[in-house]
Amino acid sequence: MAKKVLSGIQPSGSLTLGNYIGAIKNFVKLQQEHECFFMVVDLHAITVAQDPAALRENSQSVAALYLAAGIDPKISSVYMQSHVPQHAELGWILTTLTAMGELERMTQFKDKSSGKDSVGAGLFVYPSLMAADILVYNADLVPVGEDQKQHLELTRDLAGRFNHRFGDFFTVPDPYIPEVGARIMSLDDAGKKMSKSNPNPGSYIALLDPPDVIRKKISRATTDSGREVVYDPANKPEISNLMSIYAECSGLSLQQIADQYEGQMYGGFKKNLGEVLVATLEPLQQRYHEIRSSGMLEDILAEGAERARSVASQTLTEVKERMGFLPYR
Ligand code: TYM
């Protein structure tokens, strides 16, 4: 049966291969069978300071990358989170149902706030807004990478809490986390996840990196001692990470890759991985530039937001009525 699917990505810098493999690739897959909502979460991005011009550019860039990767705006709603005010409204309501202790336990908050002199309150309540993003559509499935699992658990708890206090209403959503590729690691250190906020650009592949840069970054990626191409995350985390990337972008299984490179050294494997990535990203980049220059983005985002608002406003009406807010006309 068709389910409701929702997810989002922050427009806070260039998107990486981690975002693509952990999230966008699954968005494209899920839209064939389900009713999908894919947002650019600009309200989340401002939980850390954003330069206005950069926010504008990155917002358009993420939306164009969604489309370039194969999200079809005729069947999926693609829009800006800030164009649907019900997210912020339900976010506030859910914040009042969230305990400080729950937010203090969030590892993303701990990572992003550690060592900072001053931490914005928005960063702290970020997970309640994310819960609102999901619950406002009564989404069943949320495709995300491994790092968002804890936020999803809080969302499930908040849905249950609301239902318990105000009567069954919210769907308790399930995360949709890929088996391989849920956590693509940094190219210079397989102990850290690949992230657009890493100051070393050699640690990630940006989706818009030119082919030569992609080849170079892969050829310089750290490898483990030894020379065999085998998947063994505990003992060979670096090569296992590269094998996951290879598998996700080529369609081959980890075993097929291990068989193909049996008895060979890392060099040939890395060279081919560079080519696999270029073959995946070059057509995506071409479509991206076509979309950016076509001027079609604005209409697509307007249409997506309209569809999203019509669902979200019904939810808010019902939520507020259950909680005892007076209706207005
Ligand atoms: P964000 O913008 O950090 O990342 C977007 C998506 O990419 C996934 N991801 C990865 N997957 C595998 N390996 C990696 N190295 C990697 N890096 C990022 C993330 O898990 C995510 O799925 N809080 C969210 C945005 C959000 C959201 C939502 C998601 C706001 N509201 C509602 C789902 C539903 C975030 O910061 O993602």
Image: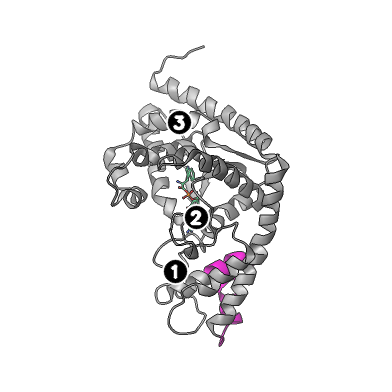
| Dot 1 alpha-carbon crowd within 10 angstroms: few under 14, some 14 to 19, many 20 or more | many
Instruction: Say which mark, if any, is on residue 177.
Output: 2
Residue furthest to the bottom in view is 263
Looking at the image, tell me whether mark 1 or mark 2 is earlier in sequence order. 2
Looking at the image, tell me whether mark 2 or mark 3 is earlier in sequence order. 3
Q: Is residue 290 above or below residue 100?
A: below
Task: Give the total number of marks visible in the rendering.
Answer: 3
Give residue 105's position: percent from left, percent from top.
Answer: 30, 48
Asked if residue 149 shows in the view, the reply is: yes
Marks 2 and 3, how far apart in space?
A: 26 Å
Residue at mark 3: 88
Residue at mark 1: 188
Going by the numbered disc 2, the residue's amino acid type is: Ile
User: Which of 223 and 150 lies nearest the eye of the viewer?
Assistant: 223
- The local secondary structure at tag 2 comes to loop
The magenta region covers 244-264
Going by the numbered disc 1, the residue's amino acid type is: Asp
